Amino acid sequence: MNKLYLLLIFGCAILLTPICAEEVKSPLLSIDNEFIRIIINNEAYDTGRFSIETTQGDPQRLSDDNQPLIYGRPKPWTSFTTIFIDGESYIFGGPTKKRAGKRGPFGKLISQHMMDGNLITICQFDSIFVTQTLSFFRNPQTRVKDMALISYTVDNKGNQEKKIGVRIMMDTQLGSNDGAPFRIGSMAVESETKFQDSTIQDFWQTFDNLASPNVIAQGTLSLKDAHILAPNRMYLVNWGTLADHPWDFTFKEGNSFVRTGETEKDTSLALYWDPISVASKTKRTVKTLYGLGGLTLSPGELSLGLSSPSEIVETSKNDILVVGYVYNAGGFTSKNTYATLTIPDGFEVIQGQAKQNIGDIPPGSSKQIAVKLALKGAKKGIHHFKLDVISTTLDANNISRNIDVLGPPDLLYALTAPSEISPSYNEYFDVSLTVKNPEPFDLYGIQSKIQLDNAFSIPDFDIGEKEIDVLKPGQEIRLNWKLQLNKAARNRHPIILSLESALTQKATITHMLNITLKPQQVSLLTSLETIQEGDYFYVELNLKNAKPFDHLSRTLVFDDEILDLIRISPGYFVLDSHQTEKIIIEKNKIMISNLYNTESAFNFSICKVHFKAKRVGEYQILLKNQGKIETMSPIVIESKSTGGSK
């Protein structure tokens, strides 16, 4: 009896579980790969706030598996983004009950979902709609997708210009270490610091111990090829200050990262894209990257680290920042320490010095050098940076790191357009360009522009220049244009499309389109069904559903012994276009020569030819086109005595 009762309960639980699961909203949304996981809060409070953590992290380092890079386990809440609109701060995402950004105000959460491997959150601030997009990014330092691309697009849907800025605050954490120094250029930052404009480096890194780092994190601030532009300002301060102040705060250079009343460092950073004018119906997008760092290590008394991109394309506009780290793992001070960076051919120093005296380094301390390079003719293939460090007191050490210079990437494309058209005026036709990325990395900022001669135009609801923000490896996107014929053009006309990106060479595609204006069919319409001797009537030369044309010529032939020509009444089209002189009378012929039309009309009359019936009988009025009969109108003239009234 008890077993049966338990079995019934167990069976009901199985039946009810799927229903309950569907009704309960997941508290988190996440995407992950073999390197990192991006998590977003999906609860009623703190909605849209995110954190980043490792899964397996760097494959060569077991210590960084399943470690946080941004504080927030199990649910993100400490990091948040501020949208600054016309001098007022608004917190992105759902409201919070906790300290970080609690002062608000908040916008209206429109939606949050996962689509095509992206985590997307949309918030409304009156007429301003802001979209947060989180996705994986292929790190040029490591050549794998171990970074998160953090993007905000501000869309001004209102009718007035707005001044809009964005602040991204991230509560950084390396595993259990919440106080590791930020390493930026030649600085190891261990107290509150501000970077602005030219002092902002392309990337920053943070790790605990160069000799044996547990986790190496990196933020990339500038990557021009990916349309990632550095913020105007970056603050490194304690978390409490940024949590309590959504935009402005009192900053004092050199303050400790330790919060008031506590003993442990609590580091965080804020990236500011200062307010700029965003016109009505336009957008502003800001982006940054955060994830794992690429760092080559060489242990020793002078332990070395070397960081730089692992690949760059020949056509890249990115600067190349090379950072060398020197850590004194010996038992006494390293004196007269020199660091020399050997730079391969085809690279040029544009900032910093390749050889530096970095002075004395006490035991357990580190120093670093930063050199910024530009491509200057480096050939395709593997190149090597080498860092040599010598000291008068410790053994010398050296380290090398490779950079692969890649050839210009390709874009595959195909144009689809008609080869021949015979359209009406204002009738649209389609042109499309299919673009595919065959490369193993994302391509950004792909732009295409259509050029036309005066035979065509682009309607008001379309634009000539179009852009693909990002094209992923193997992805294919179609760009479409609507075009229309401007006038009665004939023969072949070019449609020219250009295609280029930040990395690819400009390609030009020319398509010749033949415009044929089909001969117009002219009909004859008689005004009376029954014609009696002595009646007056007319025959109308009419075009139905007329398309643009030129050089239209016809000849109307009649028997002047049967019909007496009274007059000709030009149609409105002939009158309005001032072409009456093109209708000529010659005895028993009405000759129409070289009429043209640039517009469509549903039904337009060329002219009415008025007659008087002189003789009883059956006859034909002929309409000829280049001497050949195009159509005819039978005329039956009855005598007055056979019946029928006028």
Image (cartoon, grey):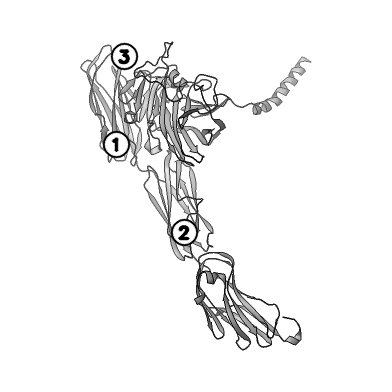
Q: Give percent across and percent down for residue 641.
A: 75, 87
Find disc 3 in the rendering and name its residue.
364
Say above or below: 498 vs 15.
below
Q: Give percent across and percent down for residue 484.
A: 50, 58
Q: CA distance from mark 1 to mark 2?
A: 44 Å
Q: CA distance from mark 2 to mark 3?
A: 72 Å
Q: Amino acid at mark 3?
A: Gly
Q: Quadrant of residue 184?
A: top left
Say above or below: 458 vs 394.
below
Q: In the displayed image of the protein, which residue is found farthest to the right?
A: 1
Q: CA distance from mark 3 to mark 1?
A: 33 Å
- Pointer 2: residues within 10 angstroms few (<14), some, or many (20+)? some
Q: Amino acid at mark 1?
A: Ala
- The quadrant of the image that shows the C terminus is bottom right
Q: Can you see residue 196? A: yes
Q: Give percent across and percent down for residue 601.
A: 57, 65
Report the residue at 45% width, 66% height from top. Answer: 491
Q: Can you see residue 439? A: no
Q: Amino acid at mark 2?
A: Phe
Q: Quadrant of residue 238?
A: top left
**SS of the residue under disc 2:** strand
Q: Is residue 369 left or right of residue 121?
A: left
Observer-nearest of 472 and 610: 610
Observer-nearest of 544 and 499: 544
Find disc 1 in the rendering and name its residue.
374
Find disc 2 in the rendering and name its residue.
456
